[in-house]
C-alpha cells in the first residue's frame, strides 16, 4: 500500500509572491522536518499546482488519526517558531484537513496527482457511494487512488477557532505517472452520485518534495 498509516493531514495555501522563495526555504528546511519528526508521523509530500498563482499542497501520513490530535502534535502547534508565525499568519486562502484513509487502491506513487474535493450530504459515507472511483487504477496513467474522509472537528486552519466552512469535506487523491496524465484524468473525472453529495473542486499538482520520518532518524545517527 502507498501509505503506511491511516491518518492523513493535508494543508494547502497560496503565498505572497515576493515571499515565495523564503516560504519554500522555511517549509523545506524547518517546518516539514519538524512535523515529520513528531511521534506517529510517518512521512510528508509537498506539491505545487499548475495554476497561477501557485497553490502549495502538503500531504502528511501518520500511523492513525489519533496521532494528528495527540499531545505531541498539539504541543507543536502551540509552540511555533518566529519564522513559522511569519508565514502562517500570511497564508492566502489556507485549508487544513485531518482525516481517515478509508480506501487505498494501487501500489505506486506518482509524479503528479489529482486532488478532488467533495462535500458529502449529511450522513453520507464515501464507501460504497464512491467505490467506482477506485476503478481509476485500471487507467494506464493512474498508479493509485486514495479516499480521505475528513474529520469536521479537527479540519480547519490553525488560525481559525470557530466553525469553518467545508471542514467536513472529503477527498479523493488520484496519483498519476506525470502532469499531462493527471490533467487528462482531471478533465474526465465524473461527478459523484447525487446521493453522496457535490463536487467542490478538482486541482492538479506536481510533486515537489518527499520526506520520510526514517530518513530523519538516519541523519541523526
Image (cartoon, rainbow, N blue to C red):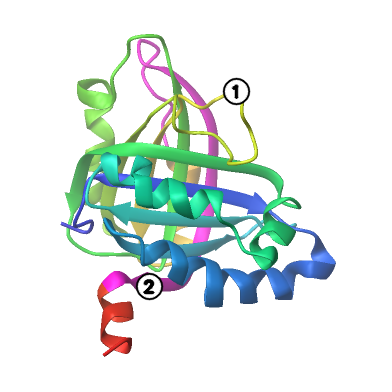
Q: Is residue 106 above or below residue 115?
A: below
Residue 5 percent location from the top left of the image:
21, 52
Q: Is residue 210 magenta?
A: yes
Q: Residues within 10 Å of mark 1 (few under 14, many from 20)?
A: few
Task: Tell me: residue 190, above or below residue 51.
Answer: above
Location of mark 2 (residue): 211
Q: Is residue 138 visible?
A: no
Which region shows up in magenta? 189-213
Give the vertical position of 144 relative to 164 (above or below): below
Q: Nearer the viewer, residue 85 or 200?
A: 85
Relative to 103, 121 lies left or right: right
Real-space CA distance between mark 1 and mark 2, rounded to the nearest whole angstrom? 30 Å
How many residues crowd mark 2 within 10 Å: few (<14), some (14–19), many (20+)?
some
Residue 204 magenta-highlighted: yes
Say which quadrant the N terminus sits in: bottom left
The quarter of the displayed image where residue 86 is located: bottom right
Residue 11, x across and y down, in percent: 52, 49
Quarter of the figure with residue 40 = bottom left
Residue 21 or residue 146, whichever sits in front: 21
Foreground pick, 35 / 184: 35
- Identified at 81% across, 64% down, the residue is 17
Amino acid at each position: 500500500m502507498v501509505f503506511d498509516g491511516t491518518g492523513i493531514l493535508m494543508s494547502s495555501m497560496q503565498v505572497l509572491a515576493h515571499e515565495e522563495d523564503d516560504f519554500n526555504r522555511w517549509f523545506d528546511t524547518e517546518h516539514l522536518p519538524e512535523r515529520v519528526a513528531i511521534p506517529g508521523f510517518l512521512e510528508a509530500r509537498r506539491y505545487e499546482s499548475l495554476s497561477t498563482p501557485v497553490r502549495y499542497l502538503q500531504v502528511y501520513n501518520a500511523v492513525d488519526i489519533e496521532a494528528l490530535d495527540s499531545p505531541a502534535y498539539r504541543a507543536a502547534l502551540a509552540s511555533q517558531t518566529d519564522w513559522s508565525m511569519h508565514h502562517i499568519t500570511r497564508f492566502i486562502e489556507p485549508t487544513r484537513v485531518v482525516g481517515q484513509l478509508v480506501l487505498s487502491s494501487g501500489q505506486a506513487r506518482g509524479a503528479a496527482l489529482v486532488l478532488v474535493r467533495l462535500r458529502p450530504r449529511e450522513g453520507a459515507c464515501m464507501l460504497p457511494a464512491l467505490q467506482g472511483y477506485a476503478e481509476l487504477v485500471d487507467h494506464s496513467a493512474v498508479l493509485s487512488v486514495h479516499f480521505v474522509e475528513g474529520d469536521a472537528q479537527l479540519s480547519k486552519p490553525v488560525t481559525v477557532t470557530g466553525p469553518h466552512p467545508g471542514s467536513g469535506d472529503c477527498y479523493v487523491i488520484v496519483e498519476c505517472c506525470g502532469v499531462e496524465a493527471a490533467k487528462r484524468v482531471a478533465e474526465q473525472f465524473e461527478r459523484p452520485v447525487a446521493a453522496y453529495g457535490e463536487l467542490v473542486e478538482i486541482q492538479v499538482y506536481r510533486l515537489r518534495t518527499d520526506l520520510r520520518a526514517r530518513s530523519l532518524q538516519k541523519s541523526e545517527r
